[in-house]
Amino acid sequence: MGNFGCCGGPITPVEEHTVGQLINWSDEEAEQDAKERGVLPRPKEIKDEIDERGAFVRQPNHFRTPFGDGEGELKAEAGRYRLFWAKGCHWSNRAAIVRELLGLQDAISINLVSHSGETNQYGWGFPDEPNHEDPVLGIKFLSEVYKNADPDYRGRCTVPAFVDVTTKKVVNNDYHRLTNYLEVAFRPWQAEDAPDLYPEELRKEIDDFNDWLFPNINNAHYRMAFCQSLEAYQEAFEDFYNAMDLLEERLSKNRFLFGDYVTDSDVRFFVTLARFDTHYYRNLGPIKHRVVDYENIWAYCRDLYEIPAFKNNTYFKDFSRESGKNQLFASFNARFADQIDYEAFWSTPQNRKALSKTPEEKFLRHNRK
Ligand SMILES: N[C@@H](CCC(=O)N[C@@H](CS)C(=O)NCC(=O)O)C(=O)O
């Protein structure tokens, strides 16, 4: 594990040094709050999203109305929407990174959700906020804005959740398309020289690539982590590592997935990579390779991590933290995560510039086309 660049200093026994989440909201309090607000316990993936073969079949996104100027479409506007996301969740991390890359911070407000109570019985909430309430909407549980939007909704209440602050309703939780809406429909509120992460001439290719990335990389970890049969596990495992081989080859010739410039697809690949060695691997059996074992992919990770919007929205310590509840053995991360200098490790030099015609410019900028 020398690659983690740790450790120095004495090792603190696990009993004295719990890296677990700080709990500011007891299960009893959360239950009481949930009762008062009519919030139901969250459904469980491994019960409700497993098919007859034991494979994990993710629930569909429920709120998919697109942003646009057409009839029935959502109207992009500054100050009207609030994005909820969770540090550990790469589906929502995408939107947080893209919002900042595009300079949309003033147009779209944001808040982080986290576990309700110690065991998260009631799904995402706001344990770190005063009175456990989102300061803008006054909700204690994310499910409140789902219920406002559809009282019959019975699925898991997930992030990303894009909420209309005027109605307190979720209007979109479609992580497949959300970043594309920020890139296109929210263009009038982006920074003037914001990067074009979704160039018109590449949209079809980017969409096709993203559709391939979803089952083979982004969802492949969840397919491995939630499935209940070895057969389903093996399938997901092979899909993931076959895809990694193809991507390693692609990145040996291209600085970013589509050449010299960062696109929407790079954000989607990055958010899974950032969690693999720090978190996901421990839900898996013997893994074939870590991310750091791929020369080009690993250098590519660090090239992206140099960009502030990627770095600012990537919380390595939170990914690697464990609550320690009901575990027979304390894992490496449970014992040592706080002693690992992830920032230094992800900041070691690389030379991806050599692959680019514009070594000093990572973006195709709107005003310099
Ligand atoms: N929007 C999608 C996927 C997004 C998703 O799974 N987000 C997870 C975090 S990675 C989530 O918010 N889970 C909350 C929960 O299950 O209570 C869905 O509805 O399935």
Image (cartoon, helix red, strand yellow):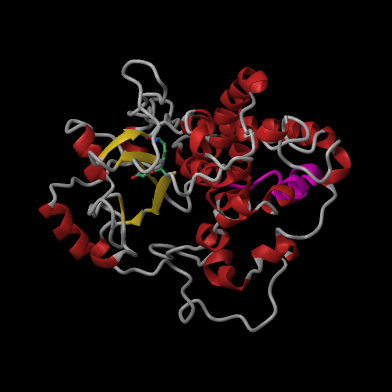
Q: Is residue 179 visible?
A: no
Q: Where in the figure is residue 243, as x and y percent of width and height?
A: 68, 31
At a point 24% along the width and 55% down the height, the residue shown is: 140
Query: Is residue 189 toward the left or the right of residue 285 in the image?
Result: left
At a point 53% along the width and 80% down the height, the residue shown is: 13
Query: Is residue 289 toward the left or the right of residue 147 in the image?
Result: right
Q: Where in the figure is residue 50, as x and y percent of width and height?
A: 38, 31
Look at the image and tell me in which quarter the N terminus lies.
Answer: bottom right
Query: Is residue 102 toward the left or the right of residue 111 in the image?
Result: right
Q: How many marks?
A: 0
Q: Where in the figure is residue 229, as x and y percent of width and height?
A: 47, 34
State whether residue 237 is above or below residue 336: above
Residue reaching furthest to the left: 36
Q: Of residues 70 and 97, which is closer to you in this image?
A: 70
Q: Of residues 214 and 160, which is closer to you in this image?
A: 160
Q: Of residues 237 and 267, which is closer to you in this image?
A: 267
Query: Is residue 270 toward the left or the right of residue 303 in the image?
Result: left
Residue 272: quarter of image: top right
State whether residue 10 is above or below residue 128: below
Residue 226: quarter of image: top left
Residue reaching furthest to the right: 354
Which region of the structure is painted magenta? 284-301
At a point 77% along the width and 48% down the height, the residue shown is: 299
Q: Is residue 61 magenta?
A: no
State whether residue 26 is above or below residue 83: below
Q: Where in the figure is residue 130, as x and y percent of width and height?
A: 27, 67
Residue reaching furthest to the bottom: 10
Q: Is residue 60 visible?
A: yes
